[in-house]
Image (cartoon, helix red, strand yellow):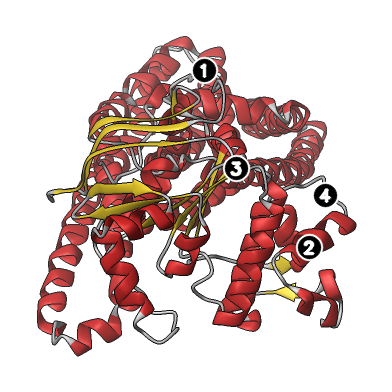
Amino acid sequence: MNRDLPVADPRQVRRAALRLVGRDMPGFTATLLLNSLAAAAALVSPWLLGDIVDVISAGGAVDLLAAIAVGAALAQLILSRYAEKIGTRFSERVQEHIRSELLDRVLALPAATVEHIRTGDLTARGTTDVALVGRTLRDAAPAILVSSLQALFLIVAVFLVDPALGAAGLLALAGIVAASRWYLRRARTAYLEEGAARSELAEHLAANAAGARTIEALGLQVKRARAAEQVIERSRVAQLRTLFLRSVLWPSVEVSSLLPPVLVLLLGGMLLDRGQVTLGAVVTCVLYLRQLGQPIETVLIWLEQLQSSGASFARIEGLATPAREEVAAAAPQGDRIEARGVHFAYEGGDDVVTGVDLTVRPGERLAVVGPSGAGKSTLGKLLAGIDRPRLGTVTVGSVPVADLSPTRLREHVVLVTQEQHLFLGTVRDNLLLADPAADDDRLGKALAAVGADWVASLDDELGTQSSGAALGPDRAQQLALARVILADPHTVILDEATAMLDPRTARRAERSLAAVLEGRTVIAIAHRLHTARDADRVAVMDNGRVVEVGAHDELIAAGGVYEALWRSWHGSRGVDAEL
């Protein structure tokens, strides 16, 4: 299975940007209007300066013209100030929308995608990429808007003063256009590669940090250090590639920005000698073109930044791709779960589930047992739609489980493992994730069902801030089980779900769950055989195959694999030994 998250194409990024702007059209319109007025006010002073030169040459008074020029400069200052204020607020609101959409998309990712994606990739998209896009929206959008309008108005103003001088100045900008086109053709690919290298580096560092003790215990420091050097080198090469593109773009822009005023001065001098243009017109055009260098440079600076942030935006928007590509599966017709000819192998390995045929009837309690490594947990993931079979089918109500949308899948099948997570927030917040409409009374009943009486003894009860470290793994597991009850699926798959609880609490929680889950389908990946003894049927796995299926007493009487497992477990003098 591909572990890399998708990246949106340029068309999808443009649509997403337009959608974000459309969500706050009043703010965008106000920003555009104020920046346009500020850019127009900036044209007044150079225009009047040319008139002042001509009036002084003729011996006239310039008091009124000077006062108007000062007033225009003051108006530009005020308009620019409010344009920046409104533009910043607009970009911050857009950034808020991006973060909200990112969170929604991450939570809506299909279970199979979440199970196999690279953690570093998702982390980089949710941190570095979002921050880069946010900074660009906050700083680049107003800067590019103002500078683009200024450049447009300045070019139009030069043509209005004298078309010949305007054409000369515009022709001199050809070098900037050529350098920009060369850069843009290469930048997107280079910045996407840089982002991928950054994600790989984050993934590697996270893996080393998480497995530091294992690395030290197995003496893998040198090997992991060499692998880290290779990842760092790939990241360095990717960054050097984007640096090379910038090193070509900026010298070309610097040289090209000096040409328009020089060319206008040369042409203006010839036309002035012939009497075809006034000195004031030449001065005005030169001033306009000198001013033109600043907005063009600003646009190009942020154009370069936009390539990086555009690549980040494509990575963020790519999180919507799994949802767009999701198969439009029909609604399941019934609750029967069936596995037919199922084979499954993890990436690069042999099959760990081989030729499994299994039917789970609605309302049945099925225990899946077998020695360690038999494929029990893998089968549980297949039945829960987290993994897709390499061969064969796993269906619920005749619909492939892996084709169901995350929302519909949670309505039908929920997998509970010993690895549970509590989010920042209160106990109530963590429970409401399963059913936002539940009231405190229903939350209390769900907690009571899993034996979580300790919540009543907390300082603020349901309002107490929760974290896995503060509550401990056993209490976190009880909250996870309470969430299952609140989610109310018709099928619950329990994979060592009570392993974090002490034996007495585990038995009490299992008895409570058995009562609460009455009428629902329960598939228990049983590492303690008392769970299998209480089940309606037992499926015995060995070497990736289901080798026996039947009731507890039937399998004991058959004297096969299950009987040997039971004898081995029962011989442990009542201790809950894992298989």
User: What amino acid does circle 2 point to?
Assistant: Arg
Mark positioned earlier in the residue sequence (1 or 4): 1
Q: Residue at x 69, y 66 (%)?
A: 450
Q: Nearer the viewer, residue 380 or 228?
A: 380
Q: Which residue is disc 2 drawn over? A: 428
User: What amino acid does circle 3 point to?
Assistant: Asp
Q: Which residue is disc 1 drawn over? A: 330
Q: Which residue is disc 4 drawn over? A: 438
- Locate residue 520: give its quadrant: top right
Q: Nearer the viewer, residue 404 or 89?
A: 404
Image marks 3 and 4: residues in contact by CB distance under 8 Å: no
Q: In the rendered view, does 278 fall on the left or right side of 466?
A: left
Label 3: state its secondary structure: helix
Tell me how far mark 4 sits from mark 2, CA to CA. Answer: 10 Å
Mark positioned earlier in the residue sequence (3 or 1): 3
Q: Nearer the viewer, residue 338 or 547?
A: 547
Instruction: Classify the position of the C terminus by image quarter.
Output: bottom left
Q: Is residue 213 visible?
A: yes
Tell me how far mark 1 sits from mark 2, CA to CA. Answer: 34 Å
Q: Nearer the viewer, mark 4 or mark 2?
A: 4
User: What amino acid does circle 4 point to?
Assistant: Ala
The circle drawn on residue 118 is none
- Locate residue 407: give its quadrant: top right
Q: Position of residue 383 (x, y in %)?
A: 41, 41
The circle drawn on residue 104 is 3
Tell me how far mark 3 sits from mark 1, CA to CA. Answer: 23 Å
- Locate residue 214: give its quadrant: bottom left
Tell me how far mark 2 sits from mark 3, CA to CA. Answer: 20 Å
Q: Residue at x 28, y 36 (%)?
A: 389
User: What amino acid does circle 1 point to?
Assistant: Ala
Label 2: state its secondary structure: helix
Label 4: state its secondary structure: loop
